[in-house]
Amino acid sequence: MLQQERHNQILAKLNLEGQVRVKDLSHDFGVTEDCIRKDLTILEKAQKLKRIHGGATLLRMNLHAIHVDDRRHVYVEEKKIIAQKAVELIKPGTTLFLGVSTVTLEIAKLIYQRNLHIIVVTNMIDIMKIFTKDCSTQLIFIGGELNQAKDGFIGSITIDQIRRYKFDLAFIGVVGIDIYDGKITTYDVKDGLTKKEVLNSSKKIYMVAESAKLELDGNYSFADIGDFTGYICEKVLDDKIVRKLKDYGLEIIE
C-alpha cells in the first residue's frame, strides 16, 4: 500500500472513531509501529490530526473568542433553537441558575417573553437587564469579580454566594466538549471554578451549546461530561456521537 493511501485510510478511521492507536493501525496495515508513528508525525505537521500518547486524535480548535462581542453574532439561529428546547424543561416554581453565556441569554429572553413564575439566579449582566422590566419572574443577581468579557461576574465572591443555593435546574454554556477524553472546557480558570460550583449546587444541570462546540477546546478543563445531567443542542447528532455521550450517562436533547 502506498503511503498516501495509508494516510487517507488513517484519516478516514480517525473521522469515524475520533482517535486511533498506533498498535491497532500497525496491525490493520501490516506495518511496524515505527512506520505508523512516522505517518502520524507527517499528518500532524500537515495539521490533519493531533498526536497523543500511543496514537492520535482529531484536531480541535481554540477560537479564543473570549469577549462576548466575538460570540454574540455567531450561530444565532442555533442558539435560539437550543433556548426553545431548554425552556420546555422549566417547571413553575423552579429555582433556575443561568450562567454567563450567549445561549443562556436567549433562554432568559424566552423566560421573560413567557412571563414564567420562577426564580432566576444569574451572574450575567445582560440577563439581569432583561428582568429589570416588569415581569413575574423573580431575579436574584450574583456579583463578584468582573470577567474578561465584561459580561458577568466570577471568582471567590461569586462562588461563595452560589455555594449557599440549591438550584433545581441550571443551564451552563461551555467553550468545548471533548467526547473522547470526556472533558468540558472554558477559557478562564476563575470562570471554570465558578461553573464547577454551579455543578455542585444544582440538582439538574444541562450544557447548552451548539454542536460546533464538539470540535472546539477552551484553555481550562473544569468538569467531566458525566458531571452534567444532559446536553441540549440544536440538531440531531451523528449516532456515534450520541452513543459516546450516552456512555457518560448524559441525557441528549436534540
Image (cartoon, rainbow, N blue to C red):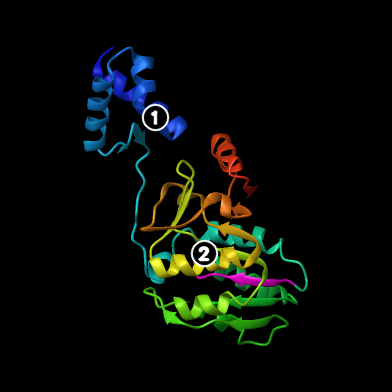
Q: Relative to the observer, which residue lies in front, 35 or 88?
A: 35
Q: Does the magenta portion include 63? A: no
Picture quadrant where residue 13 is located: top left
Residue beneath the point at 26% across and 39% down: 47
Kind of residue indicated by mark 1: Val
Q: What residue did someone put label 1 on?
A: 20
Q: Relative to the observer, which residue lies in front, 73 or 119?
A: 119
Residue 223: % across, % down: 49, 56
The numbered mark, 2 or 1, whose residue comes first in the sequence reads: 1
**On screen, 184 above or below 129?**
above
Residue beneath the point at 34% across and 15% down: 29
Picture quadrant where residue 78 is located: bottom right
SS for tag 1? strand
Range shown magenta:
94-102
Residue 44: % across, % down: 26, 36
Mark 2 → mark 1, Cα distance in angstroms? 31 Å
Relative horizontal placement of residue 211, taking residue 53 as reference (left or right): right
Residue beneath the point at 44% across and 61% down: 74
Kind of residue indicated by mark 2: Lys
Relative horizontal placement of residue 118, taking residue 160 as reference (left or right): right
Q: What residue did someone put label 2 on?
A: 196
- Labels 2, 1: front one: 2
